[in-house]
Image: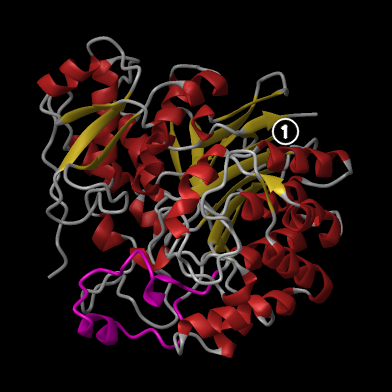
Amino acid sequence: MVSTVDHLATATGLDLLRSGGSAADAAVGANAVLAVTSPHMCGMGGDAWALVHDGSGRPHALDASGRAGSGADPDRVRAEGLSRIPLRNHVSAITVPAAVDGWLALHERFGHLPLGEVLADAIRYAEEGFPVAPLLAWTLPMVAGSAHNELPADPAIGDIVRRPGSGRALRALVDQGRDGFYGGEFGEGLLAVGAGEYTEADLAESQARWVEPVAARAWGHDIWSPPPTSQGYLTLLSAAIADGFEITPDAAGTHLLIEASAQAGHDRPTELFDGADGASLVSAQRIASRRSAIDPTRAGEVEVPPFTGDTTYLCVVDSDRMAVSLINSNASGFGSHLIAGTSGIFLHDRGLGFSLGPGHPAEYGPGRRPPHTLSPALVTRPDGSLRSVLGTMGGDTQPQILLQLLADTLVHGWDPGRAIGSPRWRFTPAEGTDGFSTWQPGVRRKVQLETPVAEGLADSLASMGHLVEVLDDAHSQFGHAHMIEVMPSGALAGAADPRALTGSAAGL
């Protein structure tokens, strides 16, 4: 089974499975198609993370997040009068894009098919064209003025669009390996954009690495996430905190999940950084401490201590029950809105997670990885067998969305379709719309509810002290989640998020 945000990518994944490919082949092939068809969410100029379960026991975690270039200089950026890394048009937000390194690492370790076969559909769509999906058509005017943009400024839904630069980059990757991409047209464009931010040596070193995953036990299962700099530990911590309460499918249960999320994230700005100890962040002591701070009847005041997405997710399970939970992101929409020269490939702005505070553990600097919102998840049963793979886009809200999906499936017993399709909540800054500012010190948060809202839910949460807002026709703000679950019978059940409009979950 394959579940992605675009039916074209899902079909590619299925074809690769049908041809004898592994879940890793299907995941890389599907992600490559998304890199071509969905530049408003992900791409070869972004980063990626993945979890791989290869039958039983501990999953493998892949960190394909890039490091800042050798020329990264926080004093220079502060001298420009900036106190935060800009989201747009600034190279400080662009670490060396690592997604392609991630594809190569995943394919080398777990792939069965030749790379050329895995990337064939992506190359075909780039060279021959693909129909513009609704979300892409609606967002392309945002980057109409970007230099080297090969996409139309205002296409109609269904127009056929080609991306020749992406086609050249993918062919170079197949024909020449890694150096064909990082040492070719894309790499040359990145060096030019950086104007000293990166060196050839930065691009010559692979950005991908295999790392130890982090786990927490909740609701009778082990929930897994990549370690920091992924914020995935927040999903694990919030689930473990919530596991100490009776989570009912009503306002009382919703309140407890909201509070568990808030308590899990209260010290994110000071605890999530390159080199942080993931296991300590989900320790029994932290779980008990944050759980004890929750009032089951009243919203708590969570003070974020000061220091003295857009994204796409996909999942694959093959006939051998190898599972891949993979997320690839440009961060916010088309990322930095900067393009790697004539390649036409948009460069991410994942460096937005860096701090410009002198001495901060996540301070922007050469060779450092920024804190990441990307947080794919994987669930195993007590015997180590696979239960589910799941993930979502959504910036700071990713752990909140995943917590709801975990509660719906592991506590309430809902199937993936019901869980994915049900209305959600999220908390977000009370002022402004920046989806990456939830955990900034001094930020006041509100709980947003997606319509249709259950009767009485908004009033009940408000009576408990939550600042509540109901949003109409804003479903993309509540994530594009996907999920595949292994049923007790051994059959697969999966769902793609209807909020993405073009998503598809399908199996063989």
Residue positioned 72% across, 80% down in the render? 179
Is residue 154 at least partly visible in the picture?
yes
> Relative to 365, is 427 above or below?
above
> Relative to 207, is 434 above or below?
above
Indicate left or right for 116 with 352 as reference.
Answer: right
> Relative to 416, is 21 above or below?
below
Query: Quadrant of the rendered structure where residue 75 is?
Result: bottom left
Is residue 273 at least partly visible in the picture?
no
User: Magenta segment: does it hold 138?
Assistant: no
In this view of the protein, which residue sits in the foreground, 442 or 123? 123
Query: Quadrant of the rendered structure where residue 325 is?
Result: top right
To which residue does mark 1 refer? 1
Task: Please identify the quadrant where the N terminus is shown.
Answer: top right
> Relative to 293, is 244 above or below?
above
Q: Which amino acid does label 1 sit on?
A: Met
Specify the segment rendered in magenta.
68-97
- Image coords of residue 285 (percent x, y): 28, 47
Residue positioned 51% across, 67% down in the render? 347
